[in-house]
Each structure stands twice: as C-alpha cells, then as structure tokens.
Image (spheres, rainbow, N blue to C red):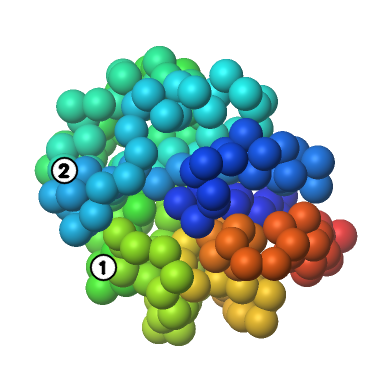
Amino acid sequence: MKYILSPSLLSADFTALDREIKVCEDNNVAYLHIDVMDGMFVPNISIGIPVVKSIRKITDLVLDVHLMIVKPERYIKAFAEAGSDIINIHYEATEDHIGVLKEIKKLGKKAAVTIKPNTSYKDIISLSDYVDMFLVMSVEPGFGGQSFIESTLKNVEGLAEYRENNGLSYDIEIDGGINADNITSPLDAGANIIVAGSAVFGKGDTAEKIRKLNGIIDKYNK
C-alpha cells in the first residue's frame, strides 16, 4: 500500500494556480485534490468542469476530484472528459451508488465514495467491490480551515479492518483539518491518502510545508 499526500487546491491561491501546482510537482506530490461544490449539497460554490480541464492542461499529477454535488450522475462523463483521474461521489448525494460507480469505471477512471462525519462506514461497506477508494470526511464538507473531528477515525478504522479481513486493496483517504500535528492519527488508524489544504497552502512556505508532511507520510512507506 502506498501512502500519499493529496494537497487540496481549495486552499491554494487561485490567482497563481499554475505556480501553486508547480510547487507541488517540484516537491514530490503525486495527487491534487480538487473540491467541486454546487451550492446545494454543501452551502458553498467552488470550481467546476472548465477549471478541472484547465488544470489537466498544465500538470500530469493525479487529479483526485471530489464531487460535493447533488446527483453526481449528471456530470460523471463531463468530469471524466475534463481529465479527472479519480472521481469521488458522496454517498449522501445519490441513490444510484452502484450505477454511478460503474459509469465511472466504464469511463476508465478510478471510482471513490465519500461519507460525511455523521455517516457510518457500515453504510458504504457494501460498495467495496465497486470502488478503488473510500474517502472519510473529518470535517463537515463545504469549507476549508475547519478543525479535525477526532470521532471520524472510527470510520477509518472500520474501513481498514474490513479491508484487511476480506483481503481487499481499496485506498482509504481522509480529508479535513489535517496538519503536521495530527497527521499520524489517521495514518495509524489505516488511512493511506491524506488530504491537506490550509496545512499546505496559504501562510508560510508551501514547499517547506509539503516537505514536512511528506517526511511524516514517507515513514509509513518504509
């Protein structure tokens, strides 16, 4: 299993997105986490298909696209064609989970399912045959800069235990409030892909912050 940092562009400087992405590339980042919000599933609006397409033009990094939108089945093909590598839907946003996941795979992309903090991993475990990754939200989706919700580690632990007991290989991603001070908690719980937004971008030296987080994560790859 590979342990990976996935910086969230939601916290990046959108006036210099190419520069922010270049810093990631130059500091051994493999994934970019892209939050797509529709103002309905979450009370905020962020980037959409044209921006994903533009990002795809300037980087070969894995685009880890997190759809926080109602009925994501409406846009799967569009986000696939825009250059997404991983398309991540919310369990709470659709009733056709298997159909959507099959469509993502049919389009040649990795499929993932996300749960909010108050949703149990038990609600999604039946989808394990259809996904490449599960994402556990450790804050309420929709806004950056929130504090980590410790109780969400139970979902990580449950998914990790099920993966081990059933000989499965899906990734477990965690997103929300993670920084250098608490990153070991989700890693120890079983997460192997770590999303970090304000802990990477914003105040301070982005490259230095990436190196610090990767230094911790890389210890788990040994």
Dot 2: element: loop
Q: Position of residue 128 (x, y in %)?
A: 40, 47
Q: Which residue is mark 1?
A: 119
Which residue is depicted at the point 52% across and 41% down? 15
Of 73 and 165, nearer the camera is 73
Residue 78: quarter of image: top left
Image point (54%, 49%), residue name? 13
- Residue at 18% x, 49% y: name it: 39
Which residue is nearer to you in this view: 27 or 84? Answer: 27
Neighbours of disc 2 within 10 Å: few (<14), some (14-19), many (20+): some
Residue type, label 2:
Val
Identify which residue, 188 or 158, lies in the foreground.
188
Q: Residue furthest front?
A: 15
Give the label on residue 88, or none: none
Q: Amino acid at mark 1?
A: Thr
- In the rendered image, the quadrant that contains the C terminus is bottom right
**Mark sitting on residue 70:** 2
Is 59 on the left-hand or right-hand side of 27? Answer: left
Question: Are circles 1 and 2 on residues that touch, CB within 8 Å?
Answer: no
Position in image of residue 167 (x %, y %): 57, 51
Q: Position of residue 14 (x, y in %)?
A: 50, 43
Q: CA distance from mark 1 to mark 2?
A: 17 Å
Looking at the picture, does residue 88 appear above or below residue 207? above
Circle 1 Cα neighbour tier, 10 Å, few/some/many (<14 / 14–19 / ≥20)? some
- What secondary structure is found at the residue carrying circle 1? loop
Q: Which of the two marks, 1 or 2, is nearer to us in this view?
A: 2
Counting residues from the N terminus, which is met first, the one under dot 1 or under dot 2?
2
* Residue sitting at x 49%, y 23%: 54
Res. 130 visible in picture? no
Where does the image place residue 65, in percent across and percent down from the top left? 44, 39
Q: Is residue 29 visible?
A: yes
Horizontal side, residue 121 vs residue 13: left or right: left
